[in-house]
Amino acid sequence: MTVAALEAPRRYPPGDLAIWIFILAELAVFAIFFAAYAFARVGNVELFDTYQQTLDRRAALVNTLALITSSWFVVRAVAAIRGDDARACARWLLAALAMGCLFLVVKGAEYAHHLGAGVTLSTNEFYMFYLSLTFFHFMHVMLGMVILAAVALKAHRGGYSAAEHTGVESGASYWHMVDLVWLILFPLVYVMR
Amino acid sequence: MADPLSPGVRDALSLPERSRGPLPCTRVWLVLVGLTLATFLIGEVGQGGLAASLLVLGLALAKGWLVGDRFMGLAGLRGPWRWVIGLWLVVPGTLIATAFVLAA
């Protein structure tokens, strides 16, 4: 690739355009969820603020740092494959997957605590939003990890190169979306009151 | 000799600059960590309230913009895709802010 080609401004984001259509659809759903939470709170501020205090903010902090760090690792993976280093790309993706595992373990422990205390979707309006919003995101983390694992395996087997790595960029874009959603979810559900 | 790559291209490729220091993506990660810790501390020491909530929301939107622009690689684009994440952040951000103002 020449410097002139690098300098040409691009019109489309990295990765397959189809994954971006999917990402936008996912983001639209989460935006509706966020707005629904915020406006449901308007009618019941005391209940939302009281039960928010039962959440483990330190666990949410660990999970936020885990997702931010995993996103950084994914950026390094994309940079590695652009430099034609498929092995390094696979290693960075494995590091990102480890951060994803940490997220699932911490969030799983939070769910175990709440379910052990008898909390369900029907306990009250706050927990209904908390459980459904965070579990919807939890499923996206799992799907993102499946995508990253598949990309890492293909990279390890030499399936990507500096010339052709659309799959790496597509997987990376999806994972960043998962991170992006949590960056709004964390303050909205755990901090803002 | 002049650097043949612009800063934008270097960012997109996560290449180190001529001057020593962390990679651009590492600097972004450090900023994200710092803003996350600030958000956590506001939640821990603050008493809540509209001003603190809007500050935390602002920090979250700034973090989201950094992820879209720098991590997702939209910074170097021209055309509507350049702004797609920013627009997404503005819509729920405005709705959330409106709801918290109404609740205050």
Image (cartoon, rainbow, N blue to C red):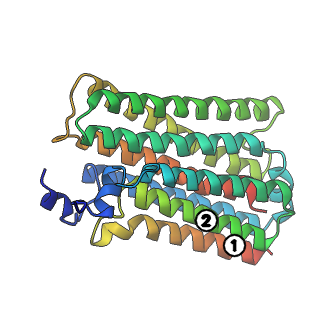
Q: Is residue B7 left or right of residue A108?
A: left
Q: Quadrant of residue B78?
A: bottom left
Name the residue located 45 percent from the left edge and 68 percent from the top edge.
B86
Q: Which residue in the protein does label 1 denote?
A: B99
Q: Residue furthest top?
A: A157
- Mark 1 chain: B
Taking B1 as reference, is A60 above or below it? Answer: above
Q: Residue at x 74, y 56 (%)?
A: A191
In front here: A193 or B29? B29
Out of B101 and A171, give the one closest to the viewer. A171
Q: Give the image quarter of residue A165.
A: top left
Q: Position of residue A157 (x, y in %)?
A: 24, 22
Q: Where residue A102 sits in the image (x, y, percent)? A: 60, 31
The percent coordinates of residue B63 (x first, y second) are 55, 60
Which residue is at the far front? B1
Closer-to-camera residue (A119/A182): A182
Residue at position x 71%, y 64% from top? A40
